[in-house]
Amino acid sequence: MTQFVHAKAFDKVGIIGAGAWGTALAQVAARAGREVLIQCREPEVAESINAQHLNHLYLPGRELLPQVKATADLADLGDCDLILAVPPAQHMRASLKAFAPHVRDGLPIVLCAKGVERGTDCLMNEVLAATLPQARAAVLSGPSFAAEVARGLPTAVTLACKDAELGAQISTTLATQTFRPYLIDDMIGAEAGGALKNVLAIACGISEGKGLGRSAHAALITRGFAEMTRLAVALGAKAETLSGLCGMGDLVLSCSSPQSRNMSVGLALGGGQTLAQALEGKISVAEGVESAPAVKHLGEKLGVDLPICNMVATILSGEASVDKAIGDLMSRPLKTER
């Protein structure tokens, strides 16, 4: 067992993105005693946080600590010691480009979105390297529902950082009695786990919506974990990373509760709704919907077999009905388990 002595914490934490997860992380940092500034795309959300300590739009009913301040201007985050980047994965590149004029050399940026960028097949650390090469990168992932984290319920996550000293500083900055980061150095593994679990959660939701039973659910999680591990290793990750919180842990959570935005989309699809109907009225983003075609393309490019993820992609694109996709999946040639 490797332990590290708590390093000196960063004092001022900036957060890009005031969705449910960004707001929950603002609460985490504030509970840890940090000064927190969260950037909001909508000026009315910034006004609500500053005036009422509430994010009515994305995290209604949860009062925020007074240390959490908000701004609609990215430039205001320029003097923060640490940045948590929490926009949806498909908006990460645009958000980082907009922040670029305000980034000093060596600024630590923690990537907190889970997905694969459509059109480039990039993980978020690749997006950061392309847009802000002067920044120092880390990845935060793991089983964590925003509403529960915001309430202060016990949560354990993975903090991936190649620089052990920086990782220790970030962990110390965010750790509380109810939020426990575990430090690793495998950013690719942490990102791959977070991206694929969103797609696999849609598959589990479809199974639940179709009433296929607990045996099918268990099979999807187990075989989905095999897909997740295969793709991560092909990308350069360590297989053991996926056995941790950012892989198996996040997969179990997202595939086991309709509180998961991705699973709720799958439930609707399995119940007979169209994708448009499943997404109608949703404010928060179900990352798996956008990541599924990118994951499928990435698997094809790397020669990695991803039958469950591919099934989800074909359903979302309208290439196959739910029933046909399930039938195709179950009629694949028999093989050994690995």
Image (tube, helix red, strand yellow):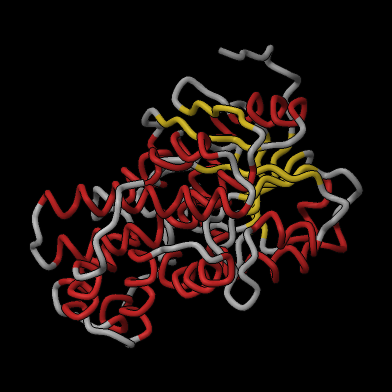
Quadrant where the N terminus is found in the figure: top right
Q: How many numbered badges does the structure rendering display?
A: 0
Left or right: 162 with respect to 280? right
Left or right: 246 with respect to 135? left
Residue at image coords 51%, 55%: 231
Residue at image coords 61%, 14%: 2
Q: Is residue 247 visible?
A: yes
- Kindly give the residue lying farthest to the right in the view shown: 105
Where is residue 265, by image quadrant? bottom left
State the image coordinates of residue 80 (x, y, percent, origin top left).
Answer: 78, 43
State the image coordinates of residue 202 (x, y, percent, origin top left).
Answer: 31, 64
State the image coordinates of residue 16 (x, y, percent, origin top left).
Answer: 65, 56
Camera-side residue of 39 and 202: 202
Left or right: 77 with respect to 200? right
Please determine whether, in this image, residue 329 is positioned above or below residue 338: below
Residue at image coords 47%, 47%: 229
State the image coordinates of residue 284 (x, y, percent, origin top left).
Answer: 42, 65
Please determine whether, in this image, residue 113 is positioned above or below residue 242: below
Where is residue 68, by image quadrant? top right
Residue at image coords 68%, 15%: 6
Camera-side residue of 284 and 157: 157
- Kindly give the residue lying farthest to the bottom in the view shown: 319
Q: Is residue 42 visible?
A: no
Camera-side residue of 144 and 37: 144
